[in-house]
Image (cartoon, grey):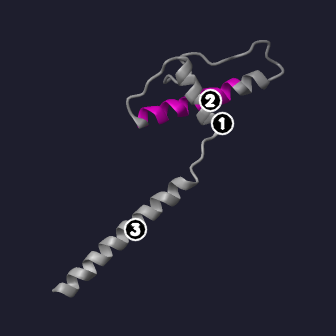
Amino acid sequence: MIIGGVVVASCIAAGAIYAVEANESQFSSDTMKQSDYDYIAHTAKYNIHHSTKTAYKMGQARYEKVDAAIKAHNADPETTSTCAHNYMSDYTE
């Protein structure tokens, strides 16, 4: 009975160590991209607040989609206008 308890405790400890190492390696290469900084600046400029991480990530995804469209429009030599971001750049369609 004692040996069985030791084996179970060892397995639990090994699992906990593996989980910690897995999380560390998962986040050790997680670096900020320029688009992350751009969205942070956008939220600061327009005083945008998100109540959850999910809402933040969704807003950032919408912002990046609009950013790509703005850059494509502004790069087109046939256009006579330019686009830019505003407070609605991360709104849903």
Q: Nearer the viewer, residue 16 or 53?
A: 16
Q: Of marks 3 and 1, which one's residue comes earlier in the chain?
A: 3
In the image, residue 21 lies at what x, y percent? 46, 64
Residue underneath mark 2 = 38
> What residue sits 46% from the left and 32% below the top?
56
In the image, residue 39 lies at what x, y percent? 57, 29
* Residues rendered magenta in the picture: 54-70
Q: Main secondary structure of the magenta part?
A: helix
> What residue sits 58% from the left and 54% below the top?
29
- Mark 2 secondary-structure assignment: helix
Q: Is residue 63 magenta?
A: yes
- Between the residue at mark 2 and the residue at mark 1, the CA separation in whole angstroms equals 6 Å
In the image, residue 83 lies at what x, y percent? 69, 17
Residue underneath mark 1 = 34
23 relative position to 42: left or right: left
Q: Residues within 10 Å of mark 3 (few under 14, many from 20)?
A: few
> What residue sits 49% from the left and 18% below the top?
47
Q: Is residue 37 above or below residue 48?
A: below
Q: Quadrant of the N terminus?
A: bottom left
Farthest residue, direction top: 80
